[in-house]
Image (tube, rainbow, N blue to C red):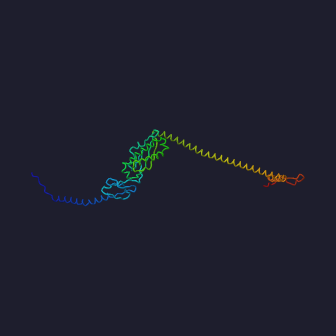
Amino acid sequence: MPVPQREPQPQRWSSAQSSAQNALRWLWRLLPVVFAVWFLFSSVVTIPADAVGVRTRFGKFNDILQPGLRFRLPFGMDRVEKIPVQRQLKLEFGFVTSDRTNPFQAGTEPQAEQSMVTGDLNMAIVEWVVQYRVDDAKEYLFHARDPALILRDASESVMREVVGDRTVDEVITIGRQDIEHGALLRLQDLAKRYGLGMAVLLVQLKNVHPPQPVQASFNEVNQAQQEKQQSINLANGEYNRAVPRARGEAARKISEAQGYAIKRTNEARGDAERFSAVLAEYVKAPEVTRQRLYHETMKEMLPKLERKVILDEKAHQILPLFQLDSQPARTR
């Protein structure tokens, strides 16, 4: 049985060909627009206010772009890496912050980072923070690979070295500031020597305590030391109050004694000079001097006595004239 032949459909083929031609025509029309948009977006770059842009041309360093809207060669000929030079970054050791933005801020093994051996072969749990910022964008990008990771490794090495030079009591109590200062100086020197392009600003100890199994015993020892220091402070305070008071009392009595001695000496000298003057007058006129001394003495003594009646031995029968029983008013 013969197979029926399909009739040609010239109308359908012509319609499909026309649609393809129209699509190709629109594609050629949109191509310049796409090219222009691509050229525009690849020719400009925006540098944030807290950063600078390191421009590389064909993979080689070209220059540093300051914050703002900057132009570059399009289509990938110029590439710009934005480096936050005004932002203060930090590295955490021994603990992890949940809302961190720096990928190198926390380590992969915080428990291992915080366990350290002191100079007297004791264990201590040390948590610390290193704050830094990028001060040379070119050196940061091209001088070392992963400079933040290098700084992190150097920080852990320096802290273990500084802690290993001190006893556990110094690490946990009185030596914190010395440890921070010593670690900061050594880390700044290493960052400069390695050419990391970063400035280390601060090394700060956070939680420093002995391991958990000996925590209770250490707390008791620490409490005893605090009570001892408190007793010493109380004793020093009492000493500072009692000794100056005793010294002041002794100085006052010495001053009073010296004043009394000067007073008695001056009085004795005055009496001696007055006696010498009276003697000289007595030698010149004994009778007159005797009478004057008698009158002066009576003038000084009589006002101190009560009212007296002095009679001549030759007077008789004069007593009834006075009211001897009544108390006369004293004159002051």
- Please state the horizontal and vertical placement of residue 26, each as a whole percent of the image: 24, 60
- Please state the horizontal and vertical placement of residue 322, each as a whole percent of the image: 86, 54
The residue closer to the viewer here, 8 or 239, is 239
Looking at the rendered image, the quarter that the C terminus falls into is: bottom right
Image position of 274 (left or right of 130): right
The residue closer to the viewer here, 103 or 293, is 293
Furthest residue toward left: 1
- Please state the horizontal and vertical placement of residue 295, each as a whole percent of the image: 82, 53
The residue closer to the viewer here, 327 or 101, is 101
Asked if residue 103 is positioned above or below residue 68 in the image, the reply reads: above
The residue closer to the viewer here, 298 or 159, is 159
Image position of 51 (left or right of 218): left
Asked if residue 30 is positioned above or below residue 110 in the image, the reply reads: below
- Please state the horizontal and vertical placement of residue 288, each as a whole percent of the image: 84, 54
Q: Quadrant of residue 30?
A: bottom left
Image position of 86 (left or right of 33): right
- Count the labels in the image: 0
